[in-house]
Amino acid sequence: MPRRLLIAAAIFHIVLTATICGLGHHGVLPSMIDSNGILITLASDGAKYQAEAIQLSEELTHGEISHWLNAPSPFHVKLHSLFFALFGPLFGSTVLNAEPVNLLCYLATLTLTFHLGWEIFNCRAGLLAAAMAGLWPSFLMHTTQPLRDPLFVAGMLAFIVVNVRLLCRVLSWKTAILTALSGGIIAAIVWLSRDTMQEVVIATTGLAGALLLIRQFAKKYFDAESDSSALGWRTRAPTLVGMALLIILSVGAPRILPKFRRPYRTDTANSTSRDEIWQNSRRKMRDTLVQQQPTSGNPWSLFVGRVGKLRQGFVVEFSDAGSNIDSDVQINSTVDFVRYLPRAAMIGFFAPFPKMWFFVGNQVSWGGRLLSGVEMLAVYLVEVLAILELWNGRRRLAVWFLWLVAAMGVISLGLVVINIGALYRLRYFFVILLMILASERARFIFGWCGRKMLSRREDLGALSAESLTLSD
């Protein structure tokens, strides 16, 4: 059954991407979709990534392998360039060339979402969560574009699966080590796809390690039978070592692959004025971040300084955007950090706010803003259901893990991201985690309503039968 659903999802995604390309090719919606299938109002940066993928694919076709390897391009652009070189003669410069990578990431997202729902709850919850994630309109549209978001979401979900396995299962030495090694590889891929999320990756596995220690000590000191059971320290040692190895690999991944820290390339031959403006803003952002060094060397001050630098980077990069929020706020000290934390939580969980749903942005039309409003209403419902499930499953570490990662992620985004469009895209992964929690509560509510309706029908049927008997 899941295999058939995956085949149906693959066909659906391919048809959707082909439809978008067809609409762009025939100029049906020129203000929304360009001739190559780029959704201008939804993912305008896809055009820059596509142009660079085409240039890299030309280097591949001309045998300039060393130039391709040394090109300071984003990791996902290099992946897409492979298929632009392979399928370019067939599909031209359209987004159909990016479909192999996007389709793989989309199917991986559905599979991993289902697996998490099934691992933590049950099969039905997993199917419901995968359906919600796979049919989420804006996320679905983003998975058809040459962006880094599909790869990042799939990679983070795989990283969560690794942490949940180490957190919730008792593994052998071999399985624990292999699980940790696979998690380290996934952490490297996530860092390559979006290096600004390095702290989120480390905090995620650190949180899983803390919960695992809490579980182990609770078993030791509050469970009288734990020492004689299969969960003794000797049995739990492989899982603890595996988690420690995963934390080490997650921290070391950016240092193992330093060459991918190179800035975005600026020597594009056919750059438009919009691209030049974007590149200038990137250079200005890098200069600003280099100049802002933390004044203290203790870990907390370094962390606060990192938050302030990331926020300033978004301020510079989106200086001309029309959907910024609190762009004048700076975080330079612990006082600034603590004072802005409640506001950041509000932005992370609830932005864009209702008053922003009906205004036209610089790039997003009125219809796009209205769609974001409809989706935010659904997000609010998902958040409520997730909180209800957190209370219902408060004794389960996996439930707390998903909720804490999601809350940490959205609050972190509220601290550093000042542009609502960027926030909306970066938040997809964390919303999917909330969907997994909400799916179990929604399944329970649907089942309860179904049982009530069935009971009511049975009561009505019994009353009808009784009335017929009395009439006879």
Image: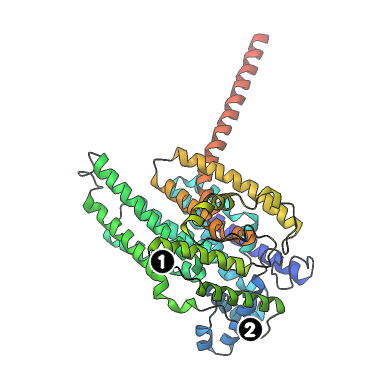
The residue that mark 1 highlights is: 296
Q: Amino acid at mark 2?
A: Thr
Residue 428 quadrant: bottom right
Q: Is label 2 in a helix, a strand or a loop?
A: loop
Taking the spot 68% from the left edge, 48% from the top edge, the residue there is: 354
Of badges 1 and 2, the one in the foreground is 1
Q: Nearer the viewer, residue 121 or 253?
A: 253
Q: Is residue 288 above or below residue 371?
A: below
In the rendered image, residue 318, in percent from the top left (x then y), is placed at 64, 67
In the rendered image, residue 33, in percent from the top left (x then y), is placed at 73, 67
Residue 278 quadrant: bottom right
In the rendered image, residue 445, in percent from the top left (x then y), is placed at 55, 36
Q: Nearer the viewer, residue 261 or 107?
A: 261
Q: Amino acid at mark 1?
A: Ser
Mark 2 burial class by Cα count in 10 Å: few <14, some 14-19, many 20+: few
The residue that mark 2 highlights is: 268
The reply to whether callout 1 and callout 2 are in contact (CB within 8 Å) is: no
Taking the spot 75% from the left edge, 60% from the top edge, the residue there is: 365
Left or right: 234 as drawn, with respect to 181: left
